[in-house]
Structures are given as C-alpha cells and as structure tokens.
Image (cartoon, rainbow, N blue to C red):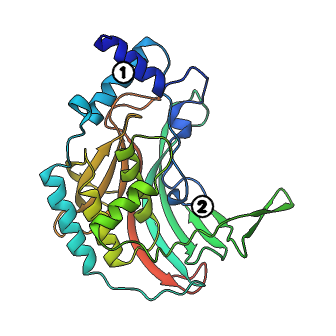
Amino acid sequence: MNDLQELKNFGAALDPADPEPPARLRHRVLSAAAAPARRRRLPRLALAGGLAAAITAGVLAAQVIGIGGHTPPASAAASEILHSAAEEARQQPVFEVRPEQFVYVESIGTNTNYGSPTSKPKLEKVHRTAWLSAGGERDGLVRSNNETFMIDGCQNGRQTQSKGGKSETTSCTPIPAYLAGLPTTADAMLDYLYTHSSGGNPRDQQAFTTAADLIRESYVPPAALAAVFEAVARIPGVDVVGDVTDDAGRPGVAVALTEVQGMRTELIFDKKNHGFLGTRSVMVRDQDGLRKGDIWASSAVLKVAIVDRAGQTP
C-alpha cells in the first residue's frame, strides 16, 4: 500500500460519508450556553468529505502522531512553564467547602456566534458570572451579559426542568463544581485524565481537553490543581505558543495542543508567576468563515470564591 492510499484510508476512518452539521456547530463553545463547558463532552468532529479532505486529514494526523506513529513529547519549555504553574498553584489558599454552598466564578471572554449556518461569524464579548452548586444538587445561576439562566441541580438522582410552561423530571447524576477527591500526584492525575476522557478524539488531545475542562469553571483544590499542570506537562504534543494577552488585558504565556479539528486549545498563565489565567481556542487553519489565527472562544478567569447562595457576591 502506498502513502497516498494510507492517507485516504485514514481520512475515511476519520470522515465517514454520512452527512453531519458543520464542525463549528459541534465544537464545544466555552461559555456560550447555560451549562458550563466543563460539563459537556466534545464529540468527534468530521472533516469535509472527498479525496482532498482525506489527504488533509492524513496530513493533520501525521502532525499529531508524529513520524512512525510516535507523538513528540511535550516541549521542555512547556514543561517548565507547567511545573512553575504547579508550584504557584500549591501556594493558593485551601477553601473549606460544604456541599450546599456554591462555587462563584467570574470571567470575561469571547465567543464566536453565527446568525445562521451560512452567515459570517461575529465575535461577542461576554462578561459571565456563575454560581455553581458545590455538591451538584442545588440549582445554580449564570449571568452572561444581559441574560440570566438557571442550572438545574440534581437531587436524589432526579432533575426537574421547566420549559414553555411545562416541567419534566428526569434521572440525573450530580455534577459538583467543587472537585474534591481528585488525584494529587502527577502520575495519578495523568492516569485520571486519560481514563476519564471520552469523545472519540485522539487520545492525547482528549486528555488535554479534559484537563482544560476540569479547571475552566470549578474549584479545584490547590494540590489537585498542581497535579493537573504537572500531568499536562507529560502529555505528548504540548508546546509553548508564546506571549499572549488574555481577555482581561493581562500579559501571559500560553501552552497548547493542536487539535485535528483545526483548532489549538491553549492554557494561559501569568507571564511573571505562571498563575493560571484562563483558556482560549484559536484557529490553526482557515475554516467555517474564520481565518487562521482567529479566536474561536476564550475565557479569562477573574475571581473564584465560595459563597452560601446563588446570586451572592464575595
């Protein structure tokens, strides 16, 4: 089998012939919907059909898996930043959190909005304040610009949702915003990221995505947060993007992993002390009305606190 045929076969495996919506309609949107992005799984995104797409898919895969099927390790520079971020995380105060309390997260960011499947994308600046149930059982609250919406809690395995004057009760599993019980060593956290990842993406990409989702809108105790950064430093393909400025105007440096879907997921850290600032998704090729280098979505975390009720400010 020649190289071109291998690329075609690989592309076909990634891109079955059945029609699906455009990738931009299925990519996770960091903060645009009521449920925090952390609580959603990223489905596998199909690439455009045809021979050209099959070849493109093969080329992208070669960039991710490396020559001979071996992914390059995380770069030394990225590892250094992430280990420094871990040390900074360990210096943070430990909050005592009760299940009935709420994790308060204030952030500002950017989302890409499409008025219709064929319209030109527009960037929207978002000021978001979320009150998320620490134990996952109480109803949470999100204020995003001029909109306010509830996040239904899960009590006794049941969740009641109201829409259009009708209520529906379904089974559920609590999703706590206080992530107690996470591993506190790099080895155990790395295993956690791989075993708790799903979505059909390449294994390393999905582990990196899981790490970003864990820390984006939640309270992760300092020891576990440090373990997340140390684990990410071991994920193959993680590299330094360089100097960036987050949505709050703070100077930072980003480490990132490029996704096969044509985006790069970045973790942004303070330029001086490497404290965690937020996340960003950036296009790495022209796609879906966006250009290479355009921001798809970003979130700069301004404040994380523990409060007693939804709507209370620290």
Residue at (48% x, 62% y) in the render: 127
Q: Does residue 70 sit above or below 223 in this rendering?
A: above
The residue beneath circle 2 is 146
Discs 2/1, front: 1
Q: Tell me where residue 232 appears, x and y as whole percent.
A: 29, 57
Q: Which residue is mark 1?
A: 56
Q: Amino acid at mark 2?
A: Asn
Residue type beneath disc 1:
Thr
Q: CA distance from mark 2 to mark 1?
A: 41 Å
Q: Residues within 10 Å of mark 2 (few under 14, many from 20)?
A: few
Q: Is residue 284 above or below residue 36?
A: above
Residue 155's spot in the image, x, y percent?
71, 75
| Residue at 59% across, 54% down | 33
Kindly state the secondary structure of the residue where label 1 is placed: helix
**Residue at horizontal 14 percent and vertical 60 percent from the top:** 80
Question: At 55% across and 59% down in the image, what residue appears?
Answer: 39
Characterize the local packing of mark 1: few (<14), some (14-19) or many (20 or more) Cα atoms within 10 angstroms.
some
Location of residue 123 with respect to 272 vertically, above or below: above
Q: Is residue 299 visible?
A: no
Pick the quarter of the image with the N terminus.
top left
